[in-house]
Amino acid sequence: MDHNPVNVERVQERIVSAGVQFINLQFTDIMGIVKTVSVPVEMWPDVLEHGQWFDGSSIQGFARIAESDMLLYPDLDTFAVLPWVTDAPTARVICDVYTPNGEPFDSDPRNVLKRALKAAAEMGYEYFTGPELEFFLFRPHGVGNGSVPTLLPLEPHDQAGYFDDGTDLGHAVRRQMVMALTALGIRVEALHHEVATGQHEIDFKYDRALRTADNAVTLRQTLKAVAQRNGLYATFMPKPIAGINGSGMHTHQSLWSDGKNAFADPSDAYGLSAVAKKFIAGQLHHARAMSAIIAPLVNSYKRLVPGYEAPVYLSWARTNRSALIRVPKVSPGRVATATRIELRCPDPSANPYLVFAAILMAGLDGIKRDLPVPPAAEEDLYHLDHQARQQMVAMPGSLGEAIDELKRSELMRQTLGDHLFERYVDAKTQEWDEYRLYVSEWELERYLPVY
C-alpha cells in the first residue's frame, strides 16, 4: 500500500523520539471490540510495505476457515503512543482490513463506514458526527476468574449526581483520562459527572465521521485502561443498575456541502433546512430497523424505557429530551455553522463504525426519497395519557423484536453488506436465544417460594 511520504517520516520521527519498542496494529470485530496484533518496532518497515497477515477466521463475523488469511494495513493518521504503557514504550495504529488479493474487506466495520461516506460524497455531502459516550465507574471487590474483576454487588465509585462537585470522586480520574486522550490526539471539549451515581461523560471534538468513530473506539479503550490503573472498572454497559439512568451515546450529526452546513436555514423556526428535515425523516423511518445496530445488547432495551431520559417513541423536537431526535439550540450568530441534530437512542456498547454507517444511510434515504418529516413533538412523551401514547410508534422493546426488524430491512442489508449482515444477525440471534433460555435470579426469587 502506498503511504504519503510525509506521514511515513512523521511517524518514524515519533517512533524514534518516544523510543517505541512495539506497535499495536488495531482493528475491531463486528461488535466493535478492539483486536490487536503487536509487532516489534523492527518489523514496522515491513508492515508499511506489505501489511500484516492475520487469521480472520478467529474474529467474530470475519472470514470462514477456508478463506481465513487477511491483511492489516495501517492508517498513519491514527498513529499514537499509548500513554499508559510504561514498561516498554508502545504505539498503536488503527488498521483497515484487506483480502489477500488487495481489496478492502467488505465486512471490516471501518470499511462499512467508508462505503457509507462514499455514498454521501456521491450525493455531494460530507458527514460530521459528535458522539457523547456515557460510562460508569465501579469499585471492584477482588479478582474473579482469571483477571476479570469481581464487581457484584455493584458499588458505584461515588454518590454524586448531575454536575455535582463536592461529592464527585471522579474529578482526578477524569482528568487523567483527558490527559491520556489528549496524548492520543483526541481533543476533549468537556467532562462532567452524569445523572446517575458513578456515571460520567467525556465529550470530544465534533469532526468528520471516520475520525470520530476512530476516536470513540479509542476513548472506550483508554478510559478502561486509566480506570484500571486507579483500581476502578469503567463500563459502557447501557444499563448496569436498575432504577437509575443508563448510559447513552447521543450522536450529534450534520451534513456539509461545498464548505457550508447543509442542515442550516436561519429563516426556519428550528433553523433547519429542507435537507435536514428529510434526513430526520429518514432516520425516523428506519429507526426500528437499525435498532439492533445502534442498541445492540439485550441490556440495551432495559435502558430504552420511559422515565430515564432515554428515547422510546419515534419523534423529534427541540427542547424535548424524551424525543428520539433533538435539535440542540445554538447561539444566534452560529446557526449557519453549528446547526446539527442529535440522535439519542444509540448506546456506547455499539460499534461506532456500524452506528454511523447505519444512521447516515437512513438519513440519506430520507433525502433521496423526499420523505416528509412529521410535526415536532415538544410535549413530554412520557407523560402523555394512555390513548395518546397508543398513537405513537415506539422503538423495539427487546433485542428479539429489534432483530426481527433488522432482518426485514433491505437498506440495512445494503449498508452492512450481505456477509456482515448475515453474521451480525446470527450473532445477535444467538445472544437473544441464550437470554431467553436463561433462568434469572429475579425469576427464582419471585416464583420459587410461591409455585
Image (cartoon, rainbow, N blue to C red):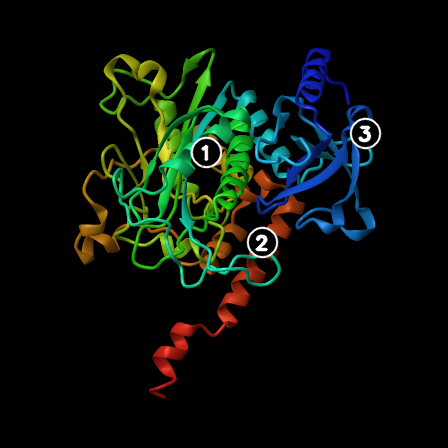
In this rendering, does residue 70 appear at all? yes
Whether residues under marks 3 and 1 lie with C-beta atoms below 8 angstroms apart, the answer is no
Residue 176's tag is 1
Cα–Cα gap, marks 1 and 2: 38 Å
Mark 3 or 1: the one toward you? 1
Residue 26's tag is none
How many residues crowd around disc 2 within 10 Å: few (fewer than 14), some, or many (20 or more)?
A: some
How many residues crowd around disc 3 within 10 Å: few (fewer than 14), some, or many (20 or more)?
A: few
In this rendering, does residue 251 appear at all? no
Numbered disc 2: secondary structure: helix
For badge 2, the amino acid type reads Val
Numbered disc 3: secondary structure: helix
Q: Earlier in the sequence, mark 2 or mark 3?
A: 3
Per the image, the residue denoted by label 3 is 43
Quadrant in which the N terminus appears:
top right
For badge 3, the amino acid type reads Met
Residue 425's tag is 2
Is 139 drawn above or below residue 8 in the view shown?
Answer: below
Q: Looking at the rendering, which quadrant does residue 79 occupy? A: top right
Q: Position of residue 140 (x, y in %)?
A: 46, 56
391 and 191: which is toward the camera: 191
Q: Position of residue 213 (x, y in %)?
A: 53, 32
